[in-house]
Image: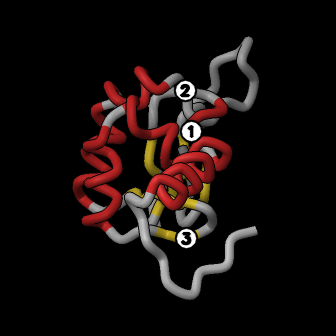
Amino acid sequence: MVIKNTTSSDIFINKSVQIDVDTTDQNDGVVLPYQILDLSKSLTNNEIANDQILKASVYSGDIIFVVDGIELDKNHSIEVYDYGPTQWAKIFNPVISKHNLYEGLASGFLYVKNCLIG
């Protein structure tokens, strides 16, 4: 799950950034201004879902989600966050999201005009 800090100040998220996993540091958990960070490398989906600072930051628009290099706006970021852990893999895991796209096209659930996939 890739996020971006949209503010000009640091945001502290529970150990999402650690300088050294064996030693605590005052800078642990800091997401720097305008930094893009993959939370899934340091937090489980359950930890992401239950992190109140992250939730408040998403709802305020201070943190937005980045999907395949595209920065979502505040409202779309809130929608993605509200989908919860069962849907996050479909959005943030490129293998799963491609599989779902191909399945939707092949089954006729999706119709895309003038679309090139590959």
Give the quadrant of the N terminus: top right
Dot 2 surroundings within 10 Å: few (below 14), some, or many (20 or more)? some
- Distance in Å between CA atoms under marks 1 and 3: 16 Å
Give above or below for 44 relative to 116. above
Tell me the residue at 52%/48% (across/down): 100
Q: Position of residue 74 (x, y in %)?
A: 30, 66
Give the quadrant of the C terminus: bottom right
Tell me the residue at 62%/36% (across/down): 17
In the figure, residue 27 lies in which quadrant?
A: top right
Tell me the residue at 47%/53% (across/down): 107
Decide if residue 93 is on the left or right side of residue 21. left
Choose mark 1 or mark 3, whichever is in front: 3
Q: Position of residue 20 (x, y in %)?
A: 75, 23
Element under disc 3:
strand
Give above or below for 65 relative to 8. above
Element under disc 2:
loop
Q: Are marks 2 and 1 in contact (CB under 8 Å)?
A: yes
Choose mark 2 or mark 3, whichever is in front: 3
Front residue of 98/41: it is: 98
In this view of the protein, can residue 94 be seen by the observer?
Answer: yes
How many marks can you see?
A: 3
* Pointer 1 or 3: first along the chain: 1
Q: Which residue is mark 3?
A: 70
Q: Which mark is residue 52?
A: none
* Pointer 2 or 3: first along the chain: 2
Q: The residue under label 2 is which amino acid type? A: Leu
Q: Position of residue 101 (x, y in %)?
A: 53, 56
Q: Which residue is mark 2?
A: 43
Q: Which mark is residue 39?
A: 1
Q: The residue under label 1 is which amino acid type? A: Leu
